[in-house]
Amino acid sequence: MNDGERLPLLEMRKVNAHYGAVHALRDVDLSIYEGELVCLLGGNASGKSTTLKTLLGMLKPTSGEVVLDGEVVNDRPTSYRVARGITMVPENRRLFKRLTVRENLQLGAYLRKDSDAIATDMERVYELFPRVKERLAQKAGTLSGGEQQMVAIGRALMSQPRVLLMDEPSMGLAPALVQQNFELISQIHEAGMTVFMVEQNANMALGIADRGWVLQTGRVVLDDTAEALLANPALRTSYLGGGQGDGDNEAAEGPAGESS
Amino acid sequence: MSLAAPSDPAPPPRPASEPAPETGPSVGGSDDDAPPRPPFAQDWRRIARMGAIGAVGQIFISLSNMPVKLDGRAIIEGVLSLGYLSLVVLPLAAGSRVGHQLRREGVPFHRPGAHEVVGGAACGALVGGGLSLLAILIANFNLREPLVNWSPILADLLAFNRGTAFAVVIWLAIGAAVGAAAGLLRVVPPLARRVLWTMVLTLFGAAVLESLTTDLAEGMGIEALIDWFYAPRGGLTITGAIALAAGSGVLALVGRGRIKGAKARIDALEGPARNRAQGGLILATAAVLVILPMFAGKLTNELLANVGLFVLLALGLNIVVGLAGILDLGYVAFFAVGSYSAAVLTAATSPRINPELPWFVALIGVVILTGLVGLFIGAPVIRMRGDYLAIVTLGFGEIIRLLFLSDWLSGWFGGSQGITNIPGAEIFGLAEVAGTDPRSVFYLVLAFCAIAIYVSWRLERSRIGRAWMAVREDETVAEAMGINTVNVKLLAFVVGAVLGSFSGAIFSAKVGSVFPASFLILVSIVILVVVIFGGMGNIVGVIAGSAVLIGVLGGPKQPGLLAEFSEFKLLIYGALLVWMMLARPEGLIPSVRRTRELHQEELAQDAWLRGQTEDDHLENGEGRS
Ligand SMILES: Nc1ncnc2c1ncn2[C@@H]1O[C@H](COP(=O)(O)OP(=O)(O)OP(=O)(O)O)[C@@H](O)[C@H]1O
Ligand SMILES: [Mg+2]
């Protein structure tokens, strides 16, 4: 897949993680290279969000290593990792609802001190999402679902990330928006961003991704290119909870099909 | 469809300058209002319910002894006392409430008319009936055993000293009259209503502020005028009341809309012009606050100083609770640590160490010590969330007080004897601030309040202020943004602690002694109530909250303007808080931010509900033509 010369930007080596006694991640190996768009698939409670939390340092691995740009960051706090270029769009967007859109974006740049560059990045977010600019003074909680997604992505971009982690970006969006959302992600990726996204919507995610992994009860059970995963009949039947992926897919494409 | 209505913004009332429509007594509604309802087609069930609630409330007030205690305080000499006022509040409220109509889309809004007056009278009579019932019960049964205020004094008060039968009749009549008047207020044109309200509030305010105005008048040498307004034994004279009512009524007529207009103009300003307007306002306020005490006597200055001490405390707690969202129920701990450390550092009588530092030098030590205690308490507490955190802070607040009280540390802090003979604060050799000169205390407090206000204001708009709000909103995501949530929360805790310690240090210099009993949990509660009452997260609101609650009702131990209320202070605080949470959760003077957020939520809910009902219609095949 990738030439062995290049170092991964972000890597998990044999990572195990626990919530108390619950074993949430089992010997997980992942590597994300600069400029890639990769995805992590898995059914409910398979440990997808846990993987992101561990990468970001909000959960400490019990064994194994998290490596950021060649440096083992196991003992580094989240703030350090954010400053070094990891950022996350959390599950369900989770904006600071009672703060304004502007404040949300400013908080994305919390660790940065370069106010001029922050201002230019703000402009860049407006370019990407003109709608956001119109709503700067509005409370984030009163935005529509689609607008909230824009602000959530904008907020994440404000930290000048090198790799963007996205937790189920299509969750809770109207079917028509899901398609649009994936287009947006691949647009950001094409602009040069490394993206690691967690998804349950296998077809759509693999449609834009380069590579992917499938997680099942905390263990990586498939690791392959997107095409190979899409072609793998076992993907849905055995790993994503028996045809559930198809169901998702229908939900996502049904109305879009109707309208066209 | 009724679901969507409750918080729909009512259409703006007709500008008072427009002529009222010719038809009947109606004003205050739009032309498509439905005609008034017939007088006797009442919702009797609603009237009975509200009347019953009011009656129970009025009986409760009576048995709390408020009327008897407050009877000594006259509002208008020989006409109305605060005690009798407390007996007619509920008929007034019930009578007004029963005529209240919601303006709902698609539901006719009936113009107020005789219907409202009759309904108000009926409801008020029911509430008054509660007192009639009480009079009968007191005459025939003796429940003095559990109810200490079940007394002949109360009976006499209710009966105007004329026997039970008179009491029964008169309270039914008073209730009905007051209720009808409340209903009538809904019928009269808005202009008249405003004038009436202004008159009533002016009279009430003048009566409540009596000691303040008298004191100020003495300072300015215009006692003669004041003697004309106020009766020798308290309360407005009748002539004074009439003059005041007339004067304020005229002012209301002339000034209608002026204040609102000015405010709107200032709000509409932008950029530097707005800053200038606000700066001018702040300067004017500061000037008044500096000049006012010069004319005021001891009592007024004492009151102002107490209010200032609580403003300082409330501003500190506001950072912790309002900005960072940490519900600290043990805030008094920092007030206590500030007082005690100032006492130890300045007083010669301090048991163990007594460096007898000058106050300002000691203040550095106070800040460091309180900051350390803040860190020490904060470190374990900050890791908890929500209700756990609240409970633990409550515990720490008590622990600190008990430590000062303990035998173990009595060698340091004097146990229950406390530390006495604390010298006043010397201001760079210029002035001596001590309790014997409340004016100087007030100026010192004022200076620290100014610092606290400036610090709060700057912090709120800073990067750290944003981080606090982010933590308040969603701690996990704040962490994911790279905010070190533990440090940030700890900082809020420490900043709050230091502001509280200023108040403590001034307090010990003012009072001259500190005892553990000054730092009861009640202080924490009162400060929190002040913050909530004024409007969490809002500096002006917090100041207004302190001024109203501490100034009028009084602090935990400090008397307010209505010293007669001291016994009922907590009852009133509680009632206010409940009412506030129900009717005005954003506080007395909400920050723009919070009003918008609270009401936007409502609007969003409404929109959602409307969406739901529309969906229902669609599903049932009713909607969309
Ligand atoms: N804070 C926590 N405490 C205890 N157990 C947790 C916690 N968070 C997650 N878990 C458990 O860890 C497992 C993996 O959870 P995780 O949130 O990573 O799943 P997921 O793959 O993101 O699922 P979903 O698609 O539903 O979001 C689940 O069994 C879950 O119950
Ligand atoms: Mg998840």
Image (cartoon, coloured by chain):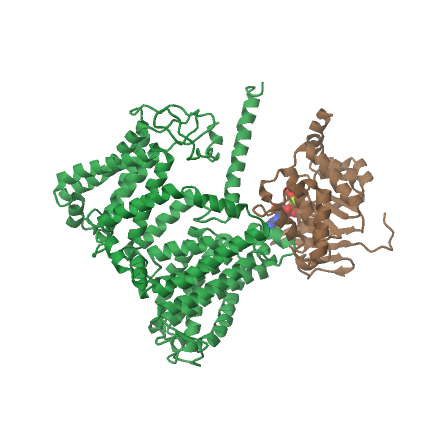
Q: Is residue B328 above or below residue A197?
A: below
* Residue B582 or residue B453, whichever sits in front: B453
Whether residue B368 is visible: yes
Give how far across and how far down residue B68 sits, in percent: 21, 51
Chain letter for the green colouring in the rendering: B
- Quadrant, the C terminus of chain A: top right
From the viewer's perspective, is B460 left or right of B425?
A: right
Residue B232 vertical position relative to residue A213 in the rendered view, above or below = below
Q: Position of residue B302 (x, y in %)?
A: 34, 64
Q: Dividing the picture into quarters, in which one does residue A199 lie? A: top right
Image label count: 0
Q: Is residue A223 visible?
A: no
- The hue of chain A in the figure is brown
Q: Residue at x 48, y 57 (%)?
A: B282
Taking depth in this image into account, of B8 and B329 the one nearest to the observer is B8
Residue B102 x/y as whole percent: 41, 32
Q: Residue furthest left?
A: B163
Q: Quadrant of residue B177?
A: top left
Q: Residue at 12% x, 42% y: name it.
A: B163
| Quarter of the image where one finds residue B565 | bottom left
Q: Nearer the viewer, residue B418 or B263?
A: B263
> Looking at the picture, does residue B579 appear above or below residue A245?
below
Residue drawn at (72%, 60%) of the image: A73
Q: Give residue B24's position: percent from left, percent from top.
A: 34, 25
Q: Is residue A216 left or right of residue B147?
A: right
| Residue furthest top in the image | B625
